[in-house]
Image: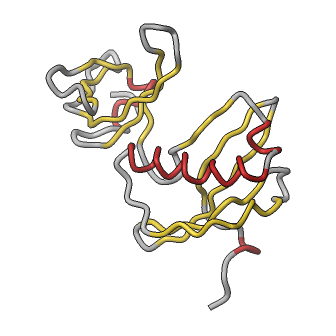
C-alpha cells in the first residue's frame, strides 16, 4: 500500500478540481465512498451527483478544511479596487459554505490591511473555535484567497 492510498478514508470530505464539458474550471465537493484500490483510484460521491459515484485518482483529491478552501482568479484588478477586496470576503465565505464548512463568525477588516507578503488581510474568522485570517495573495498576475492561522505578531494578546 502506498502512502497516497492511506491519506483518505471512507467518509472523508474532499475537493476535486476539474473542467466541465465546456472546458471551464470547476470545483466539486463530495465524500470518499470506499477504500482506494491498488491503482490509486477511489470512489467519490459528489454533492448533487449522489445518484452515481465517480472514480477519481487519489492525487487529484484534496481534503476539505478551512485552510484548503481557496478562490483563485487570474485577475489582479480584484485586489486593486478596495470595494472589490471587500467582495472577496463574501465570495470566499460562500465557497466555504458550499464546501460544507461551518464558519462561525466573520469580521471584515474594512478594505483590507496590507500584509507583509504584498497581499491583504481581508477578515478575521472563527471556525470550530479557532481563529483564522482570510488573506488575498498576489502572484504572477493572479490572486488566491484563503484562510490561514494568524501569524505570531497578529494573534490577540489574552
Query: Image height check: is 113 above or below 75?
Result: below
Residue furthest front in the image: 83
On screen, residue 9 versus residue 104, left or right, reads left
Residue 144, x across and y down, in percent: 67, 40
Residue 136 coordinates in the image, percent (x, y): 70, 49
The C terminus lies in which quarter of the figure? bottom right
Question: Measuring 22% from the left and 39% from the top, which residue is drawn there?
Answer: 10
Establish if 108 lies above or below 119. Answer: below
Q: How far across and down, in percent of the image, does residue 28 sit?
A: 39, 29
The residue under the point 62% across, 57% down is 134
At horizontal 74% and vertical 60% (from top left) the residue drawn is 111
Q: Considering depth in this image, is 74 or 153 the residue closer to the camera?
A: 74
The reply, left or right, for residue 105 in relation to residue 137 is left
Quadrant location of the N terminus in the rendered image: top left
Residue 58 to residue 69: above or below: above
Q: Position of residue 143 (x, y in %)?
A: 72, 38
User: Observer-nearest residue: 91 or 138?
Assistant: 91
- How many marks the image carries: the answer is 0
* Image quadrant in which you'd find residue 35: top left
Residue furthest to the top in view is: 22
**Which sits in the foreground, 153 or 20?**
20
Residue 148 is left or right of residue 8, and the answer is right
Way the structure is coloured: secondary structure
Q: Answer with the quarter of the image where residue 109 lies.
A: bottom right
Q: Which residue is at 60% across, 49% downward?
A: 146
- The quadrant where residue 132 appears: bottom right
131 relative to 10 in the view: left or right = right
Amino acid at each position: 500500500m502506498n502512502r497516497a492510498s492511506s491519506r483518505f478514508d471512507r467518509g472523508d470530505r474532499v475537493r476535486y478540481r476539474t473542467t466541465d464539458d465546456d472546458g471551464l474550471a470547476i470545483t466539486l465537493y463530495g465524500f470518499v465512498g470506499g477504500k482506494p484500490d491498488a491503482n490509486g483510484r477511489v470512489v467519490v460521491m459528489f454533492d448533487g451527483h449522489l445518484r452515481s459515484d465517480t472514480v477519481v485518482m487519489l492525487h487529484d483529491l484534496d481534503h476539505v478544511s478551512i485552510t484548503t478552501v481557496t478562490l483563485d482568479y487570474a485577475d489582479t484588478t480584484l485586489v486593486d479596487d478596495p470595494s472589490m477586496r471587500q467582495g472577496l470576503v463574501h465570495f470566499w465565505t460562500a465557497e466555504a459554505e458550499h464546501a460544507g464548512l461551518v464558519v462561525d463568525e466573520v469580521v471584515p477588516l474594512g478594505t483590507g490591511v496590507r500584509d507583509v507578503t504584498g497581499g491583504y488581510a481581508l477578515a478575521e474568522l472563527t471556525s470550530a473555535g479557532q481563529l483564522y485570517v482570510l488573506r488575498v495573495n498576489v502572484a504572477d498576475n493572479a490572486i488566491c484567497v484563503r484562510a490561514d492561522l494568524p501569524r505570531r505578531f497578529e494573534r490577540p494578546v489574552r
